Amino acid sequence: MNVLLNGALGKMGSEIIETAKKYDDFNIVCGFDKTEFYDKDFPIYSDIEKINEEVDVVIDFSVPVATFKILDYAKQKRIPIVIATTGFSDTQLLEIKNLSNTLPIFRSSNMSLDINLMAKLVQKIAEVLKDSDIEIIETHHNRKVDSPSGTAILLADAINQVFNNEKVYDFDRMQKREKRSKNEIGFSSVRGGNIVGEHTVKFFSENETLEITHTSYSRQVFAEGALKAARFIVTKEYGLYDMNDLLDK
């Protein structure tokens, strides 16, 4: 299938390019980014109007503003899209959901199959340890711009389904002078060095603590997941899909 890679000049863009070379069923025909670049196996455009290649699927690892630029293109051309970008507002997420009524969209805050399995596991734990205090700690490289990570929100959302979405997310306790609420999920973000990503969910009970941690050692896991998602979404006519749909296949 012919792939348009949005965010082609980023670290994940480079990872997708190298990983796709291992497979016979992927051909990256062009990219889109803020800078035009031609010293590759394919052109990278900064102007959507210049894209004239035949494209079967879009893979997006970028930033929200660039995602919506390429979504406009995908909508016009009716091309399936894999969205791996994070940091969307609630309004933007609703817009993506609305677009999926006529366009096949695969969106996940984390393209790792393991992290999505972790989401299922912490959901099961929350069902049993309903009275525990729940905290999520995420660590990423010093270039990550959104905080907390989209994956941390993904994990919290999975847990919150157990509580009918009544849990409140606490992102900043610095200005508070009060004890922890039983109805909150707390978040801590750490940024430094070149760490790919680590997420820990802790369940604090009165006399013991249970924690589950996922660590990514290579960005290749996200590239592999995005390519699997591309194979999946290219067969759909419309709808909004995520990693649970791949896990349940």
Image (cartoon, rainbow, N blue to C red):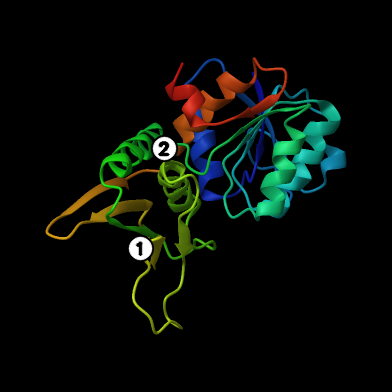
Q: Count residues near mark 1 (Cα–Cα under 10 Å), then give few for <14, some for 14-19, many for 20+.
A: few
- Foreground of the two, 164 or 138: 164
Report the Cα–Cα distance between label 2 and label 1. Answer: 38 Å
Counting the numbered discs, the total is: 2
Q: Which numbered circle lies on residue 182?
A: 1
Residue at 26%, 41% in the rendered image? 128
Tell me if residue 90 comes above or below residue 184 in the rendering: above
Q: Position of residue 156 (x, y in %)?
A: 43, 50
Q: Which quadrant holds residue 34?
A: bottom right
Residue annotated with mark 2: 220
Q: Residue at x 49, y 19 (%)?
A: 23
Q: Residue at x 81, y 36 (%)?
A: 73
Give above or below for 187 relative to 210.
below
Identify which residue is drawn at 44% across, 47% down.
160
Q: Between 109 and 157, which is closer to the camera in this rendering?
A: 157
Q: Is residue 21 visible?
A: no
Q: Which quarter of the picture shows residue 119?
A: top left
Left or right, residue 117 beside residue 19: left
Residue 196: horizontal and vertical position, in percent?
38, 52
